Image (cartoon, grey):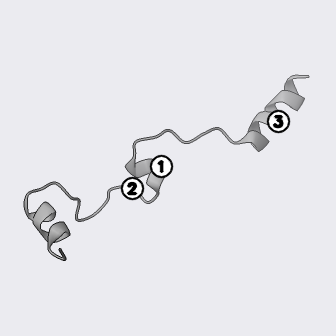
Amino acid sequence: MTQVVPELRRRGLFRHEYEGRTLRENLGLARPASRHLLARDFKAAA
């Protein structure tokens, strides 16, 4: 049972390293807009 991950890596089905620094980057998700910047822009437009 302890050989599952090494076998998956050998078959190319489990990553050795990740490209991004965060989970969001590794899942290919966009970074959400900062609510603080949105509030600042809203105040500036008013």
Using the image, determine if residue 16 lies above or below residue 2.
above
Using the image, determine if residue 32 lies above or below residue 7.
above
- Which residue type carries mark 3? Ala
Chain-order first, disc 3 or disc 1: 1
In percent of width and height, residue 25 lies at: 43, 49
How dense is the environment of label 2, judged by Cα within 10 Å: few (below 14), some, or many (20 and up)?
Answer: few
Residue found 84% across the figure and 28% down from its top:
42
Task: Calculate the distance from the C-alpha at mark 3 to the C-alpha at mark 2.
Answer: 29 Å
Query: Which mark is on residue 39?
Result: 3
Tell which of 46 and 26 is nearer to you.
26
Query: Which mark is on residue 24?
Result: 1
Tell which of 14 and 22 is nearer to you.
14
Query: Which mark is on residue 20?
Result: 2
- Pointer 2 with pointer 1, Cβ within 8 A: yes
| Quadrant in the picture for the N terminus | bottom left
Residue, far left: 11
How dense is the environment of label 3, judged by Cα within 10 Å: few (below 14), some, or many (20 and up)?
Answer: few
Residue found 8% across the figure and 58% down from its top:
11
User: What is the secondary structure assignment of the residue under circle 2?
Assistant: loop
Task: Calculate the distance from the C-alpha at mark 3 to the C-alpha at mark 1.
Answer: 23 Å
| Quadrant in the picture for the C terminus | top right
- Which residue type carries mark 1? Arg
